[in-house]
Amino acid sequence: MKHRLSATVFAVFAALSSYGNAAMAASGSPSENFTPAQRAEVVQILRQALKEDPSILTDAIRSLREKAEQQKQDSALEAVKTHLHDLQTAPDYAVRGNPHGKITVVEFFDPRCSYCRAMMPEVDRFLARHPDVRLVEKVIPVLGSGSVLDSRAIFAASAQGKYDVMRQALMADTTKPTMERITELAKANGLDADRLKADMSSPATVALITTNLDQGRAINLDGTPTFIFGSAAVAPGALNEEQMEAFLEQAKKS
């Protein structure tokens, strides 16, 4: 908070300084930097204004945050457009909804992320409402060793045609992730546990996880879940139905 506050005061001061310099230039006075006395006077005016109307500072902080957020969004979208083909490409088993849908939505998620887990039924309902949407899943382990273990198991299960089965089983499981627990879930869901364990360390599994992580870094991924609607919007965080509908409409119009 202190850092942001200092930045805001500096920005306001800089704006006043620019205004003052422009005014002096218009009146024929020197347009160089303020003298120490002039700067002290501007600071005193600023302090008095903030004391009389603190909302000035609140509005300035809000304006700076909105500008920073917009710049961040613009930067993210530029990165998405640069890497769009790779982002929208995934193995068939990691594509949900309509594989030939008109709009592609990309979802980055961590299997241990509580917000990602909470989004599962919301995403299911979203796909049911929109049969023209193609959803590309990007599993990325960003929350530690447990996430890495679960991600390896999910991708390894794809070798047995059980990617989605293992994804759902692990994301519904609240037990601490261990190899023993993964083995239990694998057996309970009809997988060959020994094969799964071997495939979890295969080059193919490592390559799949590395690819997704590289793509996340390429767009400066800020957390999970993150949704990318076409090339129109990057939406970090858990979304509600209304937000997902709005982002989808935005993608359709782009």
Image (spheres, rainbow, N blue to C red):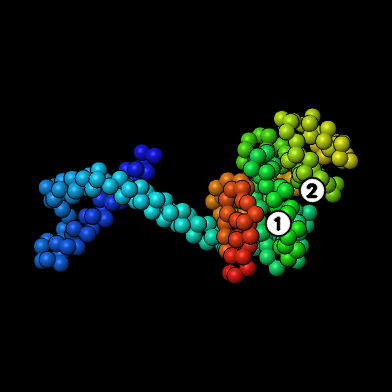
Q: Which residue is mark 2?
A: 164
**Upstream in sequence: badge 2 or badge 1:** 1
Tell which of 3 and 249 is nearer to you.
249
Tell which of 208 and 250 is nearer to you.
250
Using the rendered image of the protein, determine whether residue 17 is visible from the camera's viewpoint.
yes
Which residue is outermost to the front? 52
Query: Could you tell me which secondary element the residue under label 2 belongs to?
Result: helix
Percent coordinates x, y for residue 131 in the rendering:
75, 63
Q: At 60% from the left edge and 61% from the top edge, which residue is drawn?
A: 246
Dot 1 amino acid type: Phe
Percent coordinates x, y for residue 166 in the rendering:
79, 43
Q: At 54% from the left edge and 60% from the top edge, which residue is drawn?
A: 77
| Left or right of residue 186: residue 100 | left
Q: At 18% from the left edge and 45% from the top edge, which residue is drawn?
A: 44
Q: Which residue is mark 1?
A: 126
Query: Could you tell me which secondary element the residue under label 1 belongs to?
Result: helix
| Left or right of residue 21: residue 114 | right
Percent coordinates x, y for residue 210 in the rendering:
66, 47
Name the quadrant containing residue 174: top right
